[in-house]
Amino acid sequence: MEKTEICLGIESTAHTFGVSLVTGRGEILSDERSVYKPPPGRGIHPRESAQHHAQQAAPTLKEAFRKAGVKPSQIDAVAFSQGPGLGPCLRTGATVARALALYLKVPLVPVHHAIGHIELAALKTGAVDPLVVLVSGGHTSIVAFSAGRWRVFGETEDITLGNLLDAFAREAGLPSPGGPMVERLAGEGKRFVELPLTVKGNDVSYSGLLTYTVKLLREGVHRLEDLCFSLQEVAFSALAEAAERALAFLEKKELLLAGGVAANRTLQKKLRIVAREHGARFLVVPREYSGDCGAQIAWTGILAYRCGVQVSVERSQVKPRWRLDSVPIPWRR
């Protein structure tokens, strides 16, 4: 069998320290994660999360190599999440990646975290030229590839969809990440509560929705299950409306849902209807690869490595604020 490249990917943008080994054929040999979990009612503390990553780096790396059945000497490149994300967390992952690249004498490949989500979702679903709805703790964007880059056709004007769900969950004393618990409680909701929906063209705004829903929560008039149900309905409807505008304008034949919140079945249902109405194929990243993981970095690292994308250790500073539409994509045509 012809030898293919193997890339080691390191993810460390927020609460997850992930390590994955992926081949040039798209085989995910291993995908190990260690997740920092703050106490209920608290969000991610960047320094504490970074300390978690530093403590878990060695055992996570060791387990990734063990499961992959690969020796360090077989690695062709080391990829890392250069941004965007929490500065202390990014720096921890970058330090590990630099050390490995120097020790193994292989290229160091910088990866944009959001593009990692998109490319892994495309790999696992077979999407070729989709309109992408990217939803996670750090991203809420509607993007499509054009003229060498992923272009933004809609996005949040303030907080992301993941931030909305997590912030509401914290106020309700639910464990982090809050999205899965909000989804579970929403399934028990019986009454829709009127909440403010804000859509501005192809953009959405969630800060007002969060403020008003938290106000109702503190008043204690409505059941938590009803608030979770209503919050999801309004937030997801706003995003579906914005995505439908972009889909109608671009006339794409694929609608791809990616990112951590892509695992939410109610959101999937709404976007599936949007895709059907416009004759597009609806695709969603598999649940096991929806959240932050090393596989998204390793696979995107393979694509970038093949096109000669790499960075020297001296120029590998992390980028906590890094827009995905500023990143050239040489592997797509």
Image (tube, rainbow, N blue to C red):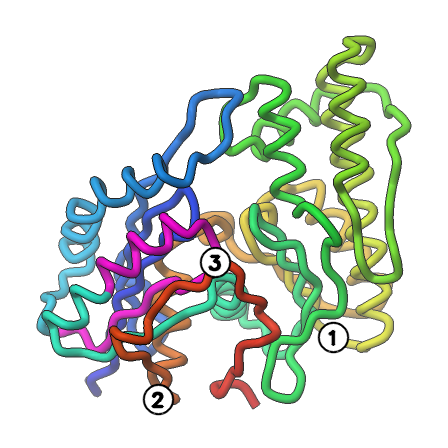
Residue 43 versus residue 235 in the image, above or below: above
Tell me the residue at 72%/59% (across/down). 155
Mark 1 — residue? 253
Of all residues, the one furthest to the front in this rendering is 314
Tell me the residue at 39%/89% (across/down). 307
Q: Nearer the viewer, mark 1 or mark 3?
A: 3
Mark 3 — residue? 320
> Which numbered disc, 2 or 1, marks the residue that appears first in the sequence?
1
**The C terminus lies in quadrant:** bottom right
Q: Is 76 displayed left or right of 298 in the figure?
A: left
- Labels 2 and 3 touching (C-beta < 8 A): no
Q: Nearer the viewer, mark 2 or mark 3?
A: 3
Q: Is 32 displayed left or right of 297 in the figure?
A: left
Binning the other alpha carbons within 10 Å of mark 1 as few (below 14), some (14 to 19) or many (20 upward) gives some
Q: Secondary structure at mark 3?
A: loop
Q: Position of residue 250 (x, y in %)?
A: 80, 77
Residue 258 versus residue 234 in the image, above or below: below
Q: Hey, which quadrant is residue 45 in on the image? A: top left
Tell me the residue at 87%/31% (across/down). 195
> Which numbered disc, 2 or 3, marks the residue that appears first in the sequence?
2
Binning the other alpha carbons within 10 Å of mark 3 as few (below 14), some (14 to 19) or many (20 upward) gives some
Segment tinted magenta in the rendering = 74-97
Q: Secondary structure at mark 1?
A: loop
- Magenta segment includes 77: yes
Q: Hey, which quadrant is residue 267 in on the image? A: top right
Gap in Å between the C-alphas at discs 1 and 3?
33 Å
Asked whether 38 or 120 is in front, the reply is 38
Residue 308's mark?
Answer: 2
